[in-house]
Image: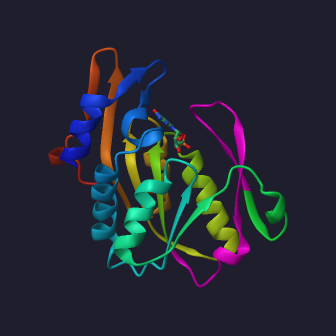
Amino acid sequence: MKLLEDVIREKGTILEGGVLKVDSFLNHQIDPELMKALGDEFAHAFKDHGINKILTVETSGIAPAVFAGFELGVPVVFGRKNKSLTLQDNMYTTSVYSYTKQISNEISISKDFLDSNDRVLIIDDFLANGQAVAGLLSICKNAGASVAGIGIVIEKSFQKGRRFVEESGIPILSLARIASLDEHGITFVDESTDQNND
Ligand code: 5GP
């Protein structure tokens, strides 16, 4: 998505270890107009997949997920990282290792909001090693929900998450795909030579 690539080039900062800082529009301050454009793109791509629910993880997946949910007319459920005292039981829980924070988080989703009637679109801000997506897939499996697609805002294609998703056979749409990220700058996967971004 050209608009997103332009914003990443203009506002993204490259940190050590192949980490991209996007605090000015996605991870801290949020650009609503851009989030709407991202949400619309996900909704358009997955509108014929029979989706009745969007699943994401707090915090940064929520904004694009809500715009996609608005456009598709379906609710958005986000995995909670801290168990609320009022939500101790009746939860699906899985452990997710955070690439950027280098800690494991428990992700919980209430059984009230996910079950075997659900056909889910998973949305997240980044795909790096695939831990967050794997955690959400495992929760969907436990709930008996089917996963119709995965929407990622920024994919770091040089890490192993993309391959993991492709091997799962679930359709994936990543709106920006970064081929490399280093002191020389950001290179995006050339869409014209890539056949897999369906
Ligand atoms: P994964 O679970 O695929 O390894 O990483 C996905 C999660 O890690 C995302 O939800 C995001 O919070 C975080 N993450 C991974 N790589 C980056 C990065 O380069 N920049 C930022 N800002 N977050 C990242």
Task: Provide residue 160's location: percent of width, then percent of height.
Answer: 48, 40
Q: Is residue 105 above or below residue 118?
A: above
Q: Residue furthest left?
A: 192
Q: Residue at x 33, y 14 (%)?
A: 183
Residue 189 visible? The answer is: no
The quarter of the image holding the C terminus is bottom left
**On the picture, is 162 further left or further right than 192?**
right
Q: Residue at x 31, y 34 (%)?
A: 179
Q: Is residue 16 above or below residue 196?
A: above
**On the picture, is 178 further left or further right than 111?**
left
Task: Provide residue 93's location: percent of width, then percent of height.
Answer: 75, 59
Is residue 47 on the magenta stretch? no
Q: Residue furthest bottom?
A: 117
Q: Residue at x 28, y 21 (%)?
A: 185
Query: For the magenta stretch, what is the residue range?
Result: 94-119
| Scheme of image coloration | rainbow
- Residue closest to the eye, 162 or 25: 25
How many numbered callouts?
0
**On the picture, is 41 further left or further right than 23?**
left
Q: Is residue 185 above or below residue 176?
A: above
Task: Provide residue 155's location: percent of width, then percent of height.
Answer: 39, 43
Q: Is residue 69 above or below residue 9?
A: below
Is residue 110 on the magenta stretch? yes
Q: Residue at x 34, y 61 (%)?
A: 39
Task: Provide residue 42's location: percent of width, then percent of height.
Answer: 33, 63
- Residue closest to the eye, 103 or 167: 103
